[in-house]
Image (cartoon, rainbow, N blue to C red):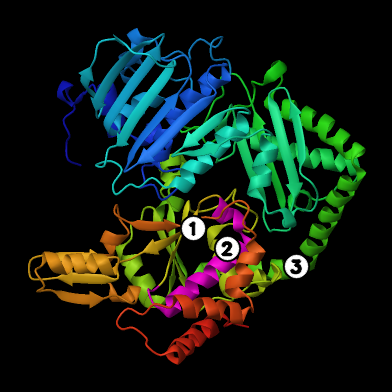
Amino acid sequence: MAQVNYTEDNIRSLDWKEHIRLRPGMYIGKLGDGSAPDDGIYVLLKEVLDNCIDEHVMGFGKVIEVEVKDGLASVRDYGRGIPLGKVVDCVSKINTGGKYDSKAFKKSVGLNGVGTKAVNALSDYFKVQAFRENKTKIAEFERGEITNNQKQKKEKGENGTLIVFKPDASIFKNYKFRSEYIETQLWNYAYLNAGLKLVFNGKTFYSKNGLLDLLNKQTAKDVLRYPIIHLNGEDIEVAMTHGNQYGEQYYSFVNGQNTTQGGTHLNFFKEAIVETVRVHFNKSYDVKDIRASIIAAVSVRVEEPVFESQTKTKLGSTEVAPGGKTLRSFISDFMKTHLDNFLHKNPEIAKAIEARIKQSERERKEIAGIKKLANQRAKKAAVHNKKLRDCRFHFSDGPRKTTEEGRLATTVFITEGDSASGSITKARNVETQAVFSLRGKPLNCFGMTKKVVYQNEELNLLQHALQIEDGLDDLRYNRVVIATDADVDGMHIRLLLLTFFLQFFPDLVRNGHLYILETPLFRVRDKKKTFYCYSESEKQEAIAKLRGKAEVTRFKGLGEISPNEFSDFIGEDIRLEPVLLQGDTDIKDLLSYYMGKNTPIRQKFIIENLRVEKEEIDSESEREVMAEEVVEETETVEV
């Protein structure tokens, strides 16, 4: 082994901003480009908003104004405002803040004094302005370096703080704020802070009934089996119901923080539901039957919560809870008392819950035999087939296997055919990217029961590859990416896969794990330069840059793209389109329209919206013929 010198020269001391910029994952989780709800730019926004929320919780400020435009975000609250003499320190000195005194911020979201410093260090431009008693103080920074430190001056206005920042484009490459994700963030803040008004680009977010409003917004009314149960207590709030969908759907919060990865409080909440239901009905119903199709939300407030990462998406605390209880006993006692009382007072709802449990029990027993055989086939197939080319992350015994950052980086591409999967397999990052290869078109499973997932070999192997058979707790990859050709067949396969996930695993979509891979449609090049274009307009721009003398290649199949080229499209500059599902979307109606037998309605839509790249279709009859072909494609069912 070669000798490596280790001397005083190898020791470095980084200042606060250098460390944040060198290891951003330690502070904000993953980076990303804004295509996922947990990407870094939304964490930056959340860090700023958390401070505003803490002011509101303490009784200061009833309005928060948010504006995002052209990559620049601004947040204005009307709390007490940062003390003017400490404005610069509070945003540029680690371990400086007002939350270390638990009396002042008893149940705060953030307690480590890092949040806004990370925003400052990771922004091209950062501005902080505090308003206190008709005086103001402004400071501006670039990547953590102060560029403008103004003196205090008189200025009339309400007390509060204004933060403006623009994420550093060299860190968050090709980033784009998506209003859907920001609106979800703001709705969650509104649900958890009754009376607080949040205004985002002119749109107001406000809630009177907390988690009851959340479930009402997140569920279509006709899928509920009974009215939502809403329970309130000191430092805890619960809302729950059952629907008709597959899977379990949970929303969990700690001190106003949306814990998207759950944690101890959510685990204890699930346990408490099962225990309470069993005691109430005096029957030992199976856990899966009790929780099947449940839609629930839980919010707790605890002192000095311990999260498993700086992004605060998963609670790790177990001991500290109100009243000196363990968190488990606190949640369990609340549910055993309040949920049990509710069910005694509302026997019709109790009957509806038991009916849903028994239905799940029947369905589970009906497919038990088929499921056992399917699992055996899947295990046998995993030994010798090459449908899944896994990533090394799952075979590592080292520390990367347990890191949140490593888990968030995992991706699986679902491809069609050997040529496409071969190109991606050769070009992928073998550490974190896996490839699952489909054989032909998958089954159109709209309207079918989950029994078909075990009977169909392709779908069964797919659910096993993702480890989602029993929910998302064991989900193997953070991002599930549909990668199909940019032609009619490819679009059809995409639709069939979307139908599969929406029909049987809607929580995978709701939790932001499903994406569509965008690959270039054209390659435009001359002897010196090459441009990859994702649209007709980009193609025309590229041709213009090459002064009209260019070779243009149209990519229709992923297999046509060489592995060397593909590495550019699934690396740092990967373009992913998230599959977004609004909470109140009726999945049955959605799939019925696109994948059902409503041929005349869908055909009319296709005829009116049909676009052809190379030439216009003049004849109405030609348009109808082409539309019929597309309609027939969407109705193909593999038996």
Q: Position of residue 593 (x, y in %)?
A: 61, 71
Residue at the image position 37 percent from the left and 86 percent from the top:
617
Judging by the rendered image, the residue that carries numbered circle 1 is 579
> Which quarter shows the N terminus?
top left
The amino acid type found where label 3 is placed reads Ile
In the image, 221: left or right of 524? right
Say if mark 1 contacts mark 2, CB within 8 Å: yes
What label does residue 501 carry, if any?
Answer: 2
Q: Where is residue 232 in the image (x, y as percent from the top left)?
A: 74, 29
Q: Looking at the image, can residue 259 be seen?
A: no
The amino acid type found where label 1 is placed reads Val
**Image: 330 above or below 565:** above
Label 2: state its secondary structure. helix
Residue at the image position 62 percent from the left and 41 percent from the top:
251
Q: Which marked residue is nearer to the observer: mark 2 or mark 3? A: 2
Say if mark 3 contacts mark 1, CB within 8 Å: no
Question: Is 488 colored magenta in this rendering?
Answer: yes
Chain part drawn in magenta: 485-510
Q: Position of residue 33 (x, y in %)?
A: 35, 47
Specify the quadrant of the image occupied by residue 42: top left
Real-space Cα separation, disc 3 to disc 1, in angstroms: 30 Å
- For label 3, the crowd category at 10 Å Cα-Cα, with few meaning under 14, some 14 to 19 and many 20 or more, is some
Q: Give whichever of discs 1 and 2 has the lower sequence position.
A: 2
Q: Position of residue 364 (x, y in %)?
A: 77, 62
Label 1: state its secondary structure. loop
Label 3: state its secondary structure. helix
The amino acid type found where label 2 is placed reads Phe
Q: Which marked residue is nearer to the observer: mark 3 or mark 1? A: 1
Q: Looking at the image, can residue 2 be seen?
A: yes
**Image: 230 above or below 549:** above
Real-space Cα separation, disc 1 to disc 2, in angstroms: 11 Å
